[in-house]
């Protein structure tokens, strides 16, 4: 056993489950040990109380896969793990980290002879059954060591995983992937909103979504998911009009500015998420006051 998984949230725990289904036995640890123990009982993986126990349970050279929140949590984990590891070990950061953080982390690891790879993982809660799409950056040697695990985690051994290039490239490709996701989701949302509010037609949105799933040029997994929930509820009256942004859309928009490559659809989709969070409210109030000032237009009070 050479592989350890740190972080057993929704993605990490399901990745551990998929590895178990594919016959890979690994060591696992999580901040809450009861979560670790429960998953170990379910999968047959080795439950570890701490990073020290995890490292000690693995044969050298080890592979430690971090499936933790990006930022400070991942930084703390790296600082704790590095003194415990040996030359030849490999750390994989599977969080949605910013690609520009990867090179400094790789340099820190290299000072101790530890390799570093960055992995962007897509698939969400469906990855356990369908497999994960994994794009990872690192050396060719690191890619060779990860191959068996990528084949187990991906939809098939031949598809759904790619060594994208040097350190940082995996997270960069995943960042762009998520930016594209923002744009696709926004387009579907706007299109269905237009159909829902079209007077006189009384359109069946669930039937239209199901129609488009078959032979249409806009068929996609996002459309499949939309068809499923529209079949249950077309009005969505109990859903708050609030959409979070997890960071990757912002980074993609910033990258378009840095590289001088226009990405208006992705950027506008990000702006619409900000608007849904109430960040457009003050601007809208300013607009209402200006219209009132120059034209005497009525102002709606809360």
Image (cartoon, rainbow, N blue to C red):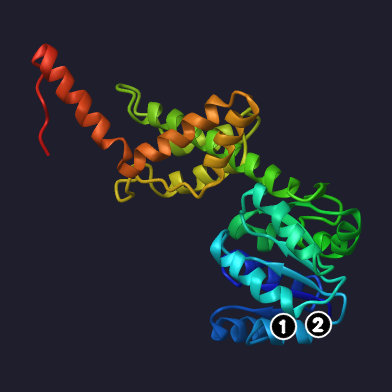
Could you tell me which quadrant the N terminus lies in? bottom right
* Residue that label 2 marks: 58
- Residue at image x 15%, y 24%? 289
User: Which of the 4 image quadrants contains residue 200?
Assistant: top left
| Disc 2/disc 1 C-alpha distance (Å) | 7 Å
- Residue at image x 47%, y 29%? 268
Residue 103 locus on image (x, y percent) = 73, 52
User: Which of the 4 image quadrants contains residue 123?
Assistant: bottom right
Q: Is residue 4 above or below residue 201?
A: below
Residue 220, can we see it? yes
Which of these two is toward me, 288 or 230?
288
Q: Is residue 161 above or below residue 59?
A: above
Label 1: element kind: helix
- Residue at image x 62%, y 38%? 220
Which of these two is toward me, 274 or 25?
274
- Residue at image x 81%, y 74%? 24
Which of these two is toward me, 203 or 64?
64
Residue 235 locus on image (x, y percent) = 33, 42
* Residue that label 1 marks: 54
């Amino acid at each position: 056993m050479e592989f350890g998984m740190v972080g057993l949230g929704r993605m990490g725990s399901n990745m551990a489950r998929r590895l178990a289904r594919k016959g890979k036995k690994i060591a696992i640890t999580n901040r809450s040990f009861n979560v670790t123990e429960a998953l170990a009982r379910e999968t047959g993986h080795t439950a570890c109380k701490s990073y020290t126990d995890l490292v000690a349970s693995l044969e050298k050279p080890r592979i430690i896969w971090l499936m933790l929140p990006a930022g400070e949590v991942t930084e703390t984990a790296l600082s704790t793990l590095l003194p415990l590891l040996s030359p030849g070990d490999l750390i994989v950061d599977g969080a949605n980290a910013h690609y520009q953080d990867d090179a400094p982390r790789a340099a820190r690891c290299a000072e101790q002879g530890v390799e570093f790879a960055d992995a962007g993982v897509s698939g969400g809660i469906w990855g356990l059954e369908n497999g994960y799409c994994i794009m990872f950056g690192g050396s060719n040697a690191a890619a060779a060591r990860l191959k068996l695990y990528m084949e187990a985690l991906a939809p098939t051994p031949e598809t759904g995983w790619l060594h994208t290039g040097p350190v940082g490239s995996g997270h960069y490709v995943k960042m762009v992937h998520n930016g594209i996701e923002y744009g696709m989701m926004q387009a579907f949302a706007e299109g269905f909103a237009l159909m829902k509010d079209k007077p006189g037609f009384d359109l069946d949105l669930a039937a239209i979504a199901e129609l488009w799933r078959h032979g249409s040029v806009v068929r996609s997994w996002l459309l499949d998911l939309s068809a499923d929930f529209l079949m249950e509820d077309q009005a969505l009256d109990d859903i708050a009009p609030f959409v979070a942004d997890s960071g990757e859309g912002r980074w993609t928009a910033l990258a378009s500015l840095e590289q001088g490559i226009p990405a208006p659809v992705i950027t506008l989709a990000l702006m619409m998420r900000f608007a849904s969070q109430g960040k457009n409210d003050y601007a809208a109030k300013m607009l209402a006051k200006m219209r009132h000032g120059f034209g005497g237009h009525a102002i709606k009070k809360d």
